[in-house]
Amino acid sequence: MAAEWKQGLFNCCGDCGICCCGTFCDCCLVYQNADNLGKSGLLCCLLACMIPCVPTMILRNEARERWGIQGSTGGDFCASVCCYPCVDCQTAVEIKERGAQN
């Protein structure tokens, strides 16, 4: 059975620190998410400065697959294109909540 996201996509204020970081310095949050998932934070941050939805989608997909969260690559793509800061916040909360468990 697939797991659920710990925080809804539009519940950015569920964790105010992450929400502020995603709102005021989204590239920093992308860097942090990538680094916490064992990916190149610098590369993802640079890519986020040019095409923000691409690293967001990749990191969301990585988190979803790592923790068996329900969804699809197409869903990750649509969410990332429509509201990448919300996706970055959701991914960061997931890493914070589940990262300590693994």
Image (tube, rainbow, N blue to C red):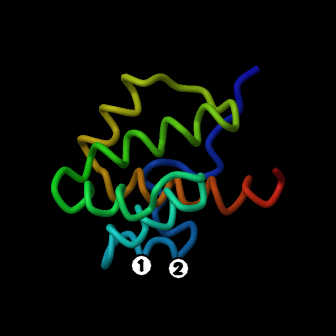
Quarter-wise, where is residue 2 in the image? top right
Q: In x, y percent, where is residue 63?
A: 58, 42
- Please name the residue shown 61% across and 31% down the image: 65
- Please name the residue shown 33% across and 68% down the image: 26
Q: Is residue 1 above or below residue 98?
A: above
- Please name the residue shown 40% across and 27% down the image: 75
* Left or right of residue 34, residue 6 in this image: right
Residue found at the far left of this picture: 50
Q: Distance of mark 1 from mark 2, alpha carbons? A: 5 Å
Q: In x, y percent, where is residue 51?
A: 19, 50
Give the SS element for disc 2: helix
* Left or right of residue 57, residue 51 in this image: left
Q: Which mark is residue 20?
A: 1
Q: Nearer the viewer, residue 28 or 22?
A: 28
Residue type at mark 1: give it: Cys
Q: Pointer 2: what residue?
A: 17
Q: Is residue 2 above or below residue 95?
A: above
Give the SS element for disc 1: helix
10 Å crowding of disc 1: few (<14), some (14-19), many (20+): some
Q: Quadrant of the N terminus?
A: top right
* Left or right of residue 2, residue 55 in this image: left
Q: In x, y percent, where is residue 87?
A: 41, 50
Quarter-wise, where is residue 44 in the image? bottom left
Residue type at mark 2: give it: Gly
Q: Which mark is residue 80?
A: none
* Total marks in image: 2
Q: Nearer the viewer, residue 18 or 41?
A: 41
Q: In x, y percent, where is residue 96?
A: 67, 63
Quarter-wise, where is residue 15 in the image? bottom right
Check whether the beta carbons of the residues at disc 1 and disc 2 lie within 8 A of each other.
yes
- Please name the residue shown 73% across and 56% down the image: 99
Q: Is residue 53 above or below residue 96?
A: above
